Image (cartoon, rainbow, N blue to C red):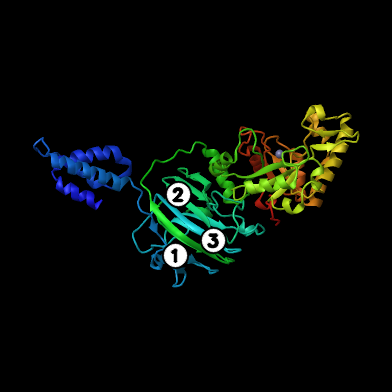
Amino acid sequence: MFLSLLFLLKATNLADFQKVSTFFLLKYEPFIKDFSIFKLIIHVPALPLKPKISKMKYVYLILFTVLLMNACTKTVTPEDMLSDATKWQGVEKGYLTDGVLDLGSEFLTLVYQPGILNTYTNFEFSTEVLTEVGGHANILFHTNKRYLDQGYAVKIDNSAPGDWDRLLKTGSLSSVRNIFYRMLSDEEWFKLVIRVEENHIQVSVNGYPVVDYIEPEVPFRTPEIDKRRLSAGTFAIETGFGNTGVKFRNMNVSKLPPGEKRQNDDSDFTRQITELHSRHLPLVDFHVHEKGGLTLPLLIEKSAKLGINYGVAANCGLKFPIQNDEELKNYLASIKGMPIFKAMQAEGREWVDMFSPDLVSEFDYAFTDAMTWTNRNGTRMRLWVPEETEVGDPEDFMEQLVSQIEQVVTEPISIYVNPTFLPVEIEDRYDELWTDERVNRVVNSLVKNNVALEINSRTRLPGKKFIAKAKDAGVKFALGTNNTNAENLGKLEWAIEIIEEFNLQPTDMFLPGNSP
Ligand SMILES: [Zn+2]
């Protein structure tokens, strides 16, 4: 920049400068909102000057243009936020050593550059973080030292599930877009990036997008999080009670130029999702398959954009894609570190003897349904395949089905999925065949075996009578879709309707490893 000004002085002549600046502004307008001095100059009426420019001046002008373009389009050098302890208010001597900020297990708040008129509006912040077992912290942005509740908080917490006060995991844009899956382990460095451009907030962890949120003009906020809004401000790090240790290194921030505001084209849904996140209701579709063009990268992107966490399930069992420990191990390795819940769909009744329990326990949860079983005539049926299914006398079929469900939920699973599904031959008699007595038997066996019940958005199962009875009995609910392709993975619309209608609370919901 300095060099380019030197060349400018050599070429100095207002008319020449105006020519260069106009060209430059037209081309690089978006990058130079801060360089309003140039705009001023080109708006000064040109002085009557000789139209001819000397050769040397051309050379200087070209050099000036090239250097100035270079200076302004190159990314600004990121600020090293951990170069000096004096940049942080609240940091005691000793916390920052050799570029590593070690917060230990203290309960504290550090504010970045609090005394300087240095605010960040659009920026990219990045850091590496390591949590010790049980360590947790928040990174605040668009905040200030007087009002730390102002702005957003990004959660750092890789603790094992179990504590209902510590549901939100690393990457959560707290209470606005929550993450419930645990993609990282303690004692491992990981990279966290927060990027804000106008009304667009993106959080990524180890390169995976986990939050991609467009703040609406009038965002839904409860009184407790009323100040979680974009404005401008600085950064802060806070730890809370129960923290056991968090470390940071390579922490940098770059200011970004002004950008375009983004349009939120599904504002009703955004509002509904935010309302659910504000009360920490686990917004997780626990039953998703990589099928019909739905790849993991697509799903991860969708998750970040919609604010729905996904549990991706591998189909494991006799005549299913994964049939032994070796294949199970390979699959687990292939999804390690991904921002999803890792699920095993156990198929058929043989699975219990096909896989070692230690490997199964590496999944976040396992689930099964009662759609694959052998009837008393010895026919192995998959109930969704009409050619394989013998219904015969519907009452007798129902007795066999209910007995099967009672048996299936004694398997080592967490969720009973595709619940109360009936073969197409009798599906229009659902309400009549699912008598109170049959519903009660299934609900009781869920309670007895501590198995959650899926609310399936695609099939709209189970019926509302079943949900009401399950809720009364204290059964936990898990939202799911069981998509067969990319298109029929919806947005949990029906499940969300059920949450509203039955006033389901976070403690009514299944979350792997948590039991209230
Ligand atoms: Zn499935």
Q: Which residue is mark 2?
A: 195
User: What mark, if any, has residue 99 been given in the picture?
Assistant: 1
Which of the two residues, 224 or 369, is positioned nearer the viewer here? 369
Report if residue 503 is visible in the image: no
Q: Position of residue 508 (x, y in %)?
A: 69, 50
- The three-letter code of the residue at mark 1 reads Gly
Location of the C terminus by quadrant is bottom right
Residue 134 % position (x, y): 60, 63
Q: Label 3 belongs to which residue?
A: 130
164 above or below 303? below
Near mark 2 (Cα within 10 A), the count class, few <14, some 14-19 or many ≥20, is many
Residue 482, x across and y down, in percent: 68, 38
Mark 1 or 3 closer to N-term?
1
Cβ at disc 2 under 8 Å from ligand 1: no
Q: Amino acid at mark 2?
A: Arg
The residue shown at (50%, 54%) is 192
Figure quarter occupied by ligand 1: top right
